[in-house]
Image (spheres, rainbow, N blue to C red):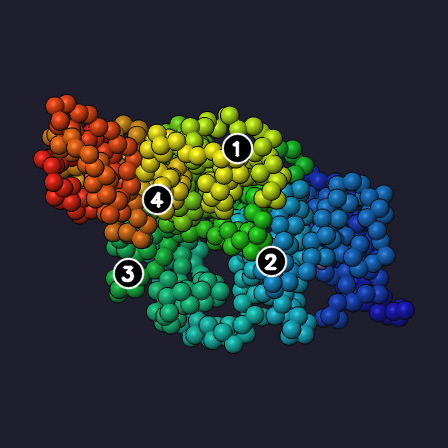
Amino acid sequence: MASLRQQIATTALTLTKFRELMKRMQENRPQDDLTIVKKAYDYSLKNHEGQTRASGDPYLIHPLEVALVLAEMKMDPIAISAGLLHDSVEDTSVTIVDIRKEFGEQVAHIVEGVTKISKIDFATREEQQAENLRKMMLAMVDDIRVVLIKLADRLHNMRTLEHLPPDRQHKIAEETLEIYAPIAHRLGMGKIRGELEDLGFRFLDPVGYEQVEKSVNARRKQGEAFLAKMEQIITHKLKEAGIQARVESRIKRLFSIHKKLQRQHISVDQVYDLCAMRVITRSLQDCYAVLGIIHNLWRPVPGRIKDFIAMPRPNFYQSLHTSVITEDGTPFEIQIRTEDMHKMAEEGIAAHWKYKDGPVSAQDEQRLAWLRQVVEWQQDVSDPAEFLSTLKVDLYPEEVYTFTPKGKVVVLPRDATPIDFAYTIHTEVGHTCIGAKVNGRMVPLRHKLHSGDIVEILTQPGHKPSRDWLGLVRSSRSRNKIKHWLNLHQRERAIEIGRKLIEKEARKYRIALKEIRDEDLLKVANSYGLGKADDLMSGIGYGKYSARQVLAKLLPAGATPSIAGEIEAEGLTSQPGAIANVVRRVFGDHNAITVRGQGDMLVYRARCCNPIRGEGIVGYITRGKGVAVHSVNCPNVTNLLYEPERRIDVEWARDESTPTAYPVKLTVYCDDRFGMLKSITGVIGDAQSNIRNIAARTSNSQASVEVVLDIADLKHLEQIIAGLRKIPGVHEVQRLQKI
Ligand code: MN
């Protein structure tokens, strides 16, 4: 039981704070009815009675400070009341039911959300953390005020962190830097983010913090004098030009300096933008006018002018940035923005938050849309650690700004490729993307996009994503969309391949697949411990079971392959590796013609000349079908010169680790004699080639044999042709360009 004297002291202290709160609210939102806030204050005063903080202060100071931060964000009375009550369910005997009865559904709902988040133990294990982040996101999507209260709560806890033991300090500081500061950043709340980061840094790495602080302080006087001089010059020039604007200058935040030192491995003396200046104007036009005035005063550093007004960051930050070099050679950064933009940069989502007035601004809607998207994406991700890593990419965007041909801005993570761009436009555009034009030029899909690129995506109906794309995309959205698609379709394709392999095998016996009864198929599936015929087919497709063995179980006893059937199936089933070939062909024919630099584009061999590895080749961009690769000897190539801008340089991929096969058609002119076919197939077999098709015509004891072979490269082909020419009775061997 607290003494009367203590009680009086507590009441006096909290009452002063409360009056400050009321005053702030009346200033910021004069129309609001504050009855509920007064009631919430009385209620928590009663419930937190006798409780103290680690600092020795009465506990109520904490909810009051939290409410004050919220009042500064210009939050509505509901949010302020929830702020005052945010710890009552967790730390007092009050329940949510009590709160609902006293303060209504909205306040209760928000307090419940805050309480839930407070119960989350943000463990250091990544997996756990991802799950917690997910919960937090869900709470945010539900009512953003929950998260604003949580941020205000964390801010006050960080401001008073010195009263906790070091291990708690460390844990809370870490959590602040990893979770709360990024969320504040993403919500555009620059001011809170900055303070959270500096406090987090101070408690997580006290030695590092002190070092940076010390060296910054050593330069502070000099820096401030410099800024004062610059400010004077700019103010004078602005007045001359008749532009109304205010100039703010500051030494950068310690945490952002620290990050810069780490990133660039430099010392504080080498940080040239330690001093920063802001010009805050009355109108958008004035921003550009001020930029002109500044560039007239000092020389701008090339490549450091950034127009975030025309191209806002994903968190809707807007500003012009430029770095200039003063007469004495000192570079420094100037940001130019309007008052509105400044407010958005400092307060973010809170700047526009007028919950009471119904629908929020379009930008706030977009922020919420982002949150909902994050939650939606993570539902496709089964591995929490991956969710966290993708979220980190999304939370620390180092983005590029690209355009659609119609001039719409598409913001992508750094190193994003046209595939990312395509998936941002639409999932279906992503799936059917076969190539892209950047600034009017064809580029491969692995091409990295840069700010300012105009990107036009080429699609082809029915085209499908490939697993290789996962290595090319940078945004979590694309990655998840591709993975989702692959998971869905891989089995289907395996089943399809399985069926094809069985069909091929069955053809040897002159049996069509439809002659095999379903129940027999099921019986065989069961014998492999499988429940469905499709499982059996996909097993064959994945290469788990051999088509030949499965078919053997399906055939009537004593069935033998017919000779005609065997010849028909020849070349696909009689050689080891044939199955792999079929699988490769079905799984992605365009992979078999990897052309360096263009490997990930839809590249195909032109049917008129069918070039093979080793031959001189030239690429030609077709309309909507990707790049056709021709042999330089192809007669059509000459015709291509009519449109030379559609020619593209291509070369064979150097990666030969995955052997590829190209069908090549040969005509062998020879004597029609017994054993000739055996000699021909013998030469081909010895050269490890696969016969796809063979046909012969005879007249007057002369024969022409047309054979379609799998050829690895030019050398391989030349070896086979030489071998064929050595056969006695062979007169000539010709390659046919057309197959
Ligand atoms: Mn609290």
**Residue position for label 1:** 556
Answer whether residue 185 is visible to the viewer in this image: no
Image point (84%, 69%), residue name: 6
Q: Quadrant of the C terminus?
A: top left
Which amino acid does the dot numbered 3 rest on? Thr
Q: Give whichever of discs 4 and 2 has the lower sequence position.
A: 2
Give how far across and how far down residue 204 sits, in percent. 56, 70
- Nearer to us of marks 4 and 3 is 4
Asked if 296 appears above or below 260 in the picture, the reply is above
Q: Which residue is denoted by mark 3 in the rendering?
A: 326
Q: Earlier in the sequence, mark 3 or mark 2?
A: 2
Mark 4 lies on residue:
575
Q: What kind of residue is marked 2?
A: Glu
For label 2, the SS is helix
Mark 2 — residue? 127
Question: Image quadrant of residue 428?
Answer: top left
Secondary structure at badge 4 equals loop
Disc with the residue nearer the chain's start (4 vs 3): 3
